[in-house]
Structure formats: C-alpha cells, structure tokens
Amino acid sequence: MNKLQKLVALSALPVVAALMPLPAQAAARPSCPVPSKAEVKRSADTRLDKPPRGTAAIKGVRVGHVPKGFTSGQVLVNKHDGITEYGYQWTDDRDDVDRRHRSLWIRVVCWPKAKSPAQLKNGPFDLGTFSGDTSTVKIGDRQVLTQEGDGALGHGRYAGWVERKGVVVTVMASQPLVPELTKIIRSIRL
C-alpha cells in the first residue's frame, strides 16, 4: 500500500466511526431523573427555599406551568426498596388545614417494574399511595390515575402516570389548584 492509499484509508476512519451505531447505553437518554448528592443532602436537612424554585425545580424535569402564590418550596428525596422518589413541593404560608392552603407536589419515581397506571395502586411508595377510589382519565396522550387527596396528602386531587417503563410521575394539587391540574400535568416534560 503506498502513501496515498494509506492517507485515503486514514481519512475515511472518522466517517466509518460516525456511521457505526453507538452502544445502547450511550444512545439512550437517561432512563429516570435522579437527584444529585447535594439534593439528597438538602432533602435530608429539610431545607426550605424562600422563595421557591421555579419550573426547573426537579433536575431532569420541566414543569411548564407552576401556579403563582407560593412562598416556599422543598426538595424531597426518598430511596428505599430499590426505588428512588425525587420531587419538589411548593407551598404558601397558610396552615395545612386551611381549605385555601396552596400546595403542589410533583414527584418522579424511578421504579423499574412500572409499566402501566394500574400498577400504581400497589406501588411501593412511602407516601402518596393510590389507596382510595381511583379513576383513569386521558390527559394529552397520558393515561392518568386520579383520586381525591386523603388525610396524609391533604385536601385536593392526586394524580399519577407511567411516563415510560420504569418512570412514574405523580402530582398532588391542593383544592385551590385542582382547576389547574390538567394544565400542570400537560406541562410536565422529562
């Protein structure tokens, strides 16, 4: 092989490398948003954000519509039984029992076994289980399981869906925010 042939062969290597498929792990987007070490510590320390964070409060999640009127917020992280629960809660200064209390909790659960909304009724969540009377509604192209908020979650509406295999999203909106719940759910992007 002469020098010219070697040069041509070497110049073709980047083209060949670009055409080769990437390994599946490198090509796939991250399967589930996970909290950083700093977020885990922030949650463990129960530190409040005053004012609360905005639409990008959860790393890897975009909430296009966060209603106005919140005075504080908090990162919530819980790891147990092979799953990770990672979310953010926005609240106002009213007492939790006040029916005008404004609270919004959005959580992503990395649960490898999650495939369908029906599984959420028996999900391994520490808080925010679908244990009451549930109904399924279609919001955009999502099949969303909903129920009335119970005592532990407060008053309002609780909703959840499987975004993709292994990734669950839940939203708890207090009673004053229920009219905006569909808009909130539609605005969430992972």
Image: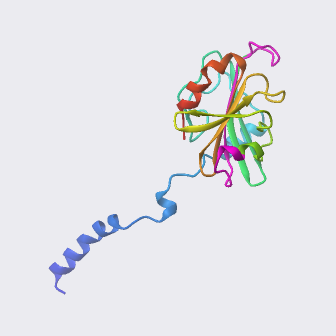
Residue 134 lies in quadrant: top right
Residue 166 in magenta stretch: no
Q: Position of residue 44 (x, y in %)?
A: 78, 39
Q: Position of residue 130 (x, y in %)?
A: 76, 38
The C terminus, quarter of image: top right
Q: Position of residue 173 (x, y in %)?
A: 69, 25
Residue 115 in magenta stretch: yes
- Which portion, as a residue range, is magenta? 93-119
User: Hey, which residue is sitting farthest bottom in the picture?
Assistant: 1
| Residue 30 shown left or right of residue 74 in the figure | left
Relative height, residue 101 to residue 12 (above, below): above
Tell which of 67 and 72 is nearer to you.
Answer: 67
Residue visible at 77% across and 46% down in the picture: 122
Residue visible at 66% across and 19% down in the picture: 177
Relative height, residue 176 to residue 167 (above, below): above
Residue visible at 62% across and 18% down in the picture: 179
The N terminus, quarter of image: bottom left
Residue 35 seen in the figure: no
Residue 129 lies in quadrant: top right
Tell which of 185 and 64 is nearer to you.
Answer: 185
Residue 81 seen in the figure: yes
Q: Position of residue 72 (x, y in %)?
A: 69, 22
| Residue 109 shown left or right of residue 23 in the figure | right
Tell which of 137 and 13 is nearer to you.
Answer: 137
Colouring scheme applied when the structure was drawn: rainbow
Residue 103 lies in quadrant: top right
Relative height, residue 76 to residue 14 (above, below): above
Tell which of 15 and 102 is nearer to you.
Answer: 102
Give the total of numbered labels.
Answer: 0
| Residue 45 shown left or right of residue 137 in the figure | right
Residue visible at 30% across and 69% down in the picture: 16
